[in-house]
Amino acid sequence: MNISIFGLGYVGCVGAACCAKLGHHVIGNDVSENKVNLINQGRPTIIEAEIEGLVKEAHDKGLLEATMDYGYAVRNSEISFIVVGTPSSKEGHLNLNYIYGVARQIGEALKDKKDFHIIAIRSTVLPGTNEKVGEIIAEASGKQRGRDFTVVSNPEFLREGTAVQDYLNPPLTLIGTDSELAEQKFRELYKDIPGEFISTDIEVAEIMKYVNNTYHALKIVFGNEVGNICKQLGIDSHKVMEIFCKDKQLNISPYYFKPGFAYGGSCLPKDSKALRTLAHDLYVDCPVINAINPSNELQKKNAVEIIESKGKRKIGILGLSFKAGTDDLRCSPIIDVAEALLGKGYEIHIYDKNVRASQLTGTNADFIEAKLPHLHDIITDDLDLVASACDVLVVTNKEKEFADLPEKYPRKVIVDLVREYDTLNYEGNYEGISWGNINTNPAQNDELTRDMIKTEF
């Protein structure tokens, strides 16, 4: 393929050399005459492992050239990558002027081009940038997105020092697009790259780099805080984290990475509190570990606010234990939600087939006596009784019996805390706690008739 790359800095230079390595013809473009000259001399613009040999090889084969003429770059390519910098302000906002400037240049160059052109944003940008870039190109070119050109998001996941190997051997290749043609072109472009090829929504692709890097930062800080605690105890922190990383079923796995409700149960609240207390006693400051519980409490508050926003008085809670398949009520987060709603005057009905108030003993009984002393009056193992009596159904556990709630109880309000459903065509109102609307039915947008005003204290 014929490719143009706008920006010959770190990511642009690596991308140009690696695309040429894959057999594509690459035209680099930059406002820096020095960078353009370096590429045209077969020399890289950066210091990076393996890059010098790749650039020279590509130049010698006639697969890599550079120019300051953006019109030439666009006219002689079918895909243009935008790989310019997006520096941040002190407040954390991105300066997208370089992105928008390149978009305008590409638009101007497309005025006289008849062939369909693909613009790929490789720079790290926030959601919404793709749409704005498309608007700028359409305005500058007088052409229509989807008919004459399209804009895709193709974020890079490169580490300095291993960028070439990261490019040629990625864990996955990600593209966000609404164009079937663009997806086909990128599958062809990256056909010799190992790893899964994922085509997704544009906004999902735009935010992935931020999620990835923030999590990487979190891992480093978490490891450091554990190390600081271990040091005060005379424990080898590297052995601790080495063993921690051997657990691929829970510790290093997708298991807990599912947006949803707060955690609960007998272990996570107790043990994370114990570690925080230990750090405090050792005079070790652990701001990340200390922030875990407040964040968890905030998710309970979010659940209460979503339920209150529906303006309905009768609330059905489907599942009281802290997770499906158990009767364990210790630190179950939905109990705090129920307690808060009862305190605000809501009529609460609870369904849980695993929990029977008459059989509560030991720690379960003590916990409920402190939180919901009148539980026996509001809990039942009859799902139909609760669902029929209530206007809002709060799904708290991923039980199979909740899968057909929308069909069995139409026009109810469903508040989903566990992503019980992937998509819905449901006449009633639906809202997930940590994800956007998945209800495709127009009735979802009907204004709710309220019978209770939100109570503030």
Image: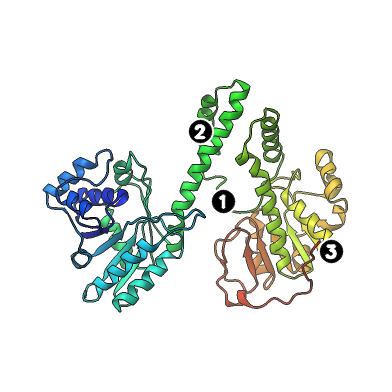
Q: Nearer the viewer, residue 290 or 20?
A: 290
Query: Which residue is under mark 1?
Result: 258
Does residue 28 appear to the left or right of 250 in the view shown? left
Front tag of 3 and 1:
3
Q: Residue at x 29, y 66 (%)?
A: 118
Does 8 appear above or below 239? below
**Residue 402: percent from left, percent from top:** 66, 59
Does 112 appear above or below 106? below
**Residue 374: percent from left, percent from top:** 88, 53
Q: Residue at x 12, y 49 (%)?
A: 61
Query: Which residue is under mark 2?
Result: 245
Query: Which residue is under mark 3?
Result: 345
Q: CA distance from mark 1 to mark 2?
A: 20 Å
Q: Hey, what amino acid is under mark 2?
A: Cys
Does 280 appear above or below 66? above
Q: Hey, what amino acid is under mark 1?
A: Lys
Q: CA distance from mark 3 to mark 1?
A: 32 Å
State the image quarter where residue 434 is shown: bottom right
**Residue 88: percent from left, percent from top:** 45, 54
**Residue 324 seen from this side:** no
